[in-house]
């Protein structure tokens, strides 16, 4: 992707996240996104097939840097926000959530967030599978692996929702401790 295409894509992401800060996903039209981004309809569709695809791509951008860090590329993130690599990917994720990077909390708390939550859960499952050794001491042998992974993901989402509902008073470090403690 050349620099001009990256700039256009960034403008669309910025417009989309700005709109997400003002209204629910299902109430945003492609027309509003292109007006806010100051791009043409054909330009929008050259980058994204649909508004749902735009959300999916935004989700990829929001979370793929964590996997870059896991693959040893923690010195530089090439995505839509800056961050410092962390030793704990779960702490890293909580820190980004606390900073509300690109209105991620709006996506998480939106009443019509099923597409986002589905992608979020898929990415969490990858994290859990990649870091299953962190959780193995808590697993009973009689529990199926898939149920155990589901439990970890559900606990993370539940912990995150509790944190958001309580105005995120705890630090990311503390909420990460809570997450591991209640598993």
Image (cartoon, rainbow, N blue to C red):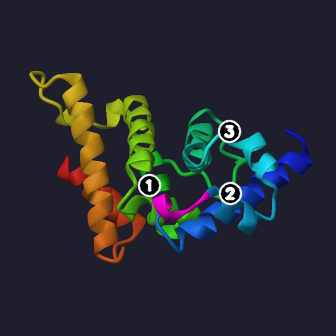
Which of 38/64 is in front? 38
CA–CA distance in space, label 1 to label 3: 17 Å
**Residue identified by numbered label 1:** 91
Say whether marks 2 and 1 touch (CB < 8 Å).
no
Say what secondary structure mark 1 lies in: helix
Quadrant into which the N terminus falls: top right
Left or right, residue 119 beside residue 136: right
Q: Alpha-carbon distance for marks 2 and 1?
A: 25 Å
Which label's residue is closer to the chain start, 2 or 1?
2
Q: Secondary structure at mark 3?
A: loop
Q: Which mark is residue 131?
A: none
The magenta segment: 25-29
Q: Which residue is mark 2?
A: 13
User: Which mark is in front, 3 or 2?
Assistant: 2
Q: Main secondary structure of the magenta part?
A: helix
Q: Earlier in the sequence, mark 1 or mark 3?
A: 3
For disc 2, the neighbor class at 10 Å (few under 14, some 14 to 19, many from 20) is many
Q: Nearer the viewer, residue 70 or 79?
A: 79
The residue at 90%/50% (across/down) is: 4
For image coordinates 28% across by 75% down, the residue present is 166
Spot occupied by residue 173 in the image (x, y as percentages of width and height): 39, 63
| Residue in the image at 25% along x and 55% along y | 158
**Which residue bears the numbered disc 3?**
73
């Amino acid at each position: 992707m050349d620099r001009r295409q990256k700039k256009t894509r960034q403008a669309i992401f910025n417009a989309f996240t700005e709109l997400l800060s003002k209204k629910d996903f299902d109430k945003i039209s492609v027309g509003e996104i292109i007006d806010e981004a100051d791009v043409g309809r054909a330009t929008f569709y050259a980058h994204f097939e649909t508004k749902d695809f735009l959300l999916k791509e935004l989700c990829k951008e929001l979370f793929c840097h964590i996997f870059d860090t896991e693959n040893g590329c923690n010195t530089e993130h090439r995505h839509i926000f800056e961050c410092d690599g962390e030793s704990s990917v779960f702490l890293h994720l909580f820190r980004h959530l606390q900073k509300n990077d690109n209105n991620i909390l709006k996506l998480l708390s939106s009443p019509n967030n099923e597409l986002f939550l589905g992608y979020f859960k898929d990415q969490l499952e990858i994290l859990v599978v990649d870091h299953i050794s962190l959780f193995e001491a808590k697993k009973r042998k009689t529990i199926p692996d898939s149920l155990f992974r589901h439990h970890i993901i559900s606990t993370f989402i539940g912990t995150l929702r509790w944190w958001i509902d309580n105005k995120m008073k705890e630090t990311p470090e503390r909420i990460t401790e809570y997450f591991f403690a209640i598993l």
